[in-house]
Amino acid sequence: MSDPLSATLSALADPTRRAILARLAQGQASVNELAAPFDITLAAVSRHIKVLEGAGLVSRSKKAQWRPCKLKAAPMRDVAALLENYRQFWEQDLDQLDYYLKALQPPPRNKT
């Protein structure tokens, strides 16, 4: 990817990678621990982790034979900033929809 935001968005596009990140948000884990809930090979999980590493979302350290993966959430700040630019648009759009739906409602009837 040519820019970090595109790499982050590409990495986040896959549900397996998002699930791996959700697990890592709870703390460090080995590749085997990350692979446990998935019905895919260990090699496939390793490839997902490499994509996450390439996007700067995961780091691996080496502690003897154990190579724990750790979440690095900083690249998600750029995604949050991008989405924040559109939040006001969505909210304004929803306010306009609310106004329109209220205008469609028939006036209340008098019960006399």
Image (cartoon, helix red, strand yellow):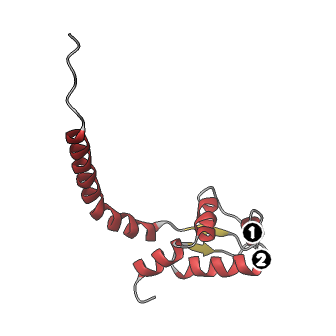
Determine whether 68 is above or below 104 in the image.
Answer: below
Residue 86 circle label: none
Indicate the amino acid at tag 1: Ala
Residue at the extreme front of the image, as rendered: 112
Left/right of residue 43 with respect to residue 77 in the rendered view: right
Up/down of 18 relative to 43, above or below: above
Secondary structure beneath label 1: helix
Residue at left offset 75%, top offset 81%: 43
Coordinates of residue 33 in the picture (x, y in percent): 76, 65
Give the residue pinned by disc 2.
Answer: 42
Q: Is residue 43 left or right of residue 13?
A: right
Q: What is the number of the mark on residue 35?
A: 1
In three-dimensional space, the C-alpha distance between marks 1 and 2, rounded to whole angstroms, equals 6 Å
Which residue corresponds to the image point at 44% horizontal and 67% vertical from the top-left?
A: 76
Residue 95 drawn above or below residue 43: above
The image quadrant of residue 16 is: bottom right
Nearer to the camera, 102 or 4: 102
- Answer whether labels 1 and 2 touch (C-beta < 8 Å): yes
Q: Nearer the viewer, residue 40 or 112?
A: 112
What crowding class fits label 1: few (fewer than 14 Cα within 10 Å), some (14-19), or many (20 or more)? some
Helix or strand or loop: what does disc 2 sit on? helix
Q: Residue at x 42, y 80 (%)?
A: 6
